[in-house]
Amino acid sequence: MQFMLIFSQPTEEFAKAADPAQAGAYFGTWKAYIGAMAQAGVIVNGHGLMPPKTCTMVRLRDGKRQVQDGPYADTKEHLGGYFVIEVASQDEALEWAARSPSSSVGHTEVRPVLPPQA
């Protein structure tokens, strides 16, 4: 079964990636986590995302496109990246999610991937 692990972190956590004094520890935890998943052979695909300040929101209202730079101002957590993993059960996917660095400071969402439709 395939599951998407979606990583969300508070703004302060994302800031560590750009701080030379904290970047090593920040990326070290992610490197260890990704390494463990790679060694277990569960990764199908995945990517980290650029910081939230680089995003653009698009909506279509009354036939008109609305574009807003950056995330919603009231958002306390931001999407940082995702992995699609292939494991035997949802319980196993939940175990991988619990090991994510995001789970200790934000949250990790676990969602089954829709199977291909014929």
Image (cartoon, rainbow, N blue to C red):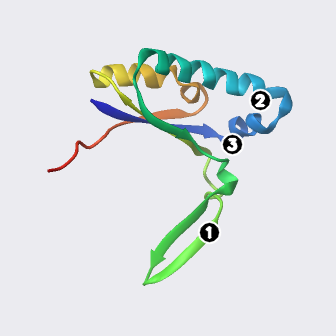
Q: Amino acid at mark 3?
A: Thr
Looking at marks 1 and 2 on the same chain, the residue that comes earlier in the sequence is marked by 2
Q: Which residue is mark 1?
A: 68
Q: Secondary structure at mark 1?
A: strand
Looking at the picture, tell me which residue is in the foreground, 75 or 40.
Answer: 40
**Residue at 34 percent of width and 19 percent of height:** 92
**Residue at 45 percent of width and 25 percent of height:** 97
The reply, left or right, for residue 83 in relation to residue 55 is left
| Residue 9 occupies quadrant | top right
Does 82 appear above or below 104? below
* Numbered-mark total: 3
Q: Which residue is mark 2?
A: 23
Measured as percent of width and height from the top left, residue 116 is found at 22, 45
Q: Secondary structure at mark 2?
A: helix
Q: Amino acid at mark 2?
A: Ala
Q: Amino acid at mark 1?
A: Gln
Q: Which residue is mark 3?
A: 11
Query: Which numbered mark, 1 or 2, is in the foreground of this view?
Result: 2
Measured as percent of width and height from the top left, residue 15 is found at 75, 39
Does 6 appear above or below 61? above
The reply, left or right, for residue 30 in relation to residue 36 is right
Q: Secondary structure at mark 3?
A: helix
Looking at marks 2 and 3 on the same chain, the residue that comes earlier in the sequence is marked by 3
How far apart are the alpha carbons under marks 3 and 1? 18 Å
Q: Count residues near mark 3 (Cα–Cα under 10 Å), then give few for <14, some for 14-19, many for 20+.
A: some
Residue 69 makes an appearance in the image = yes
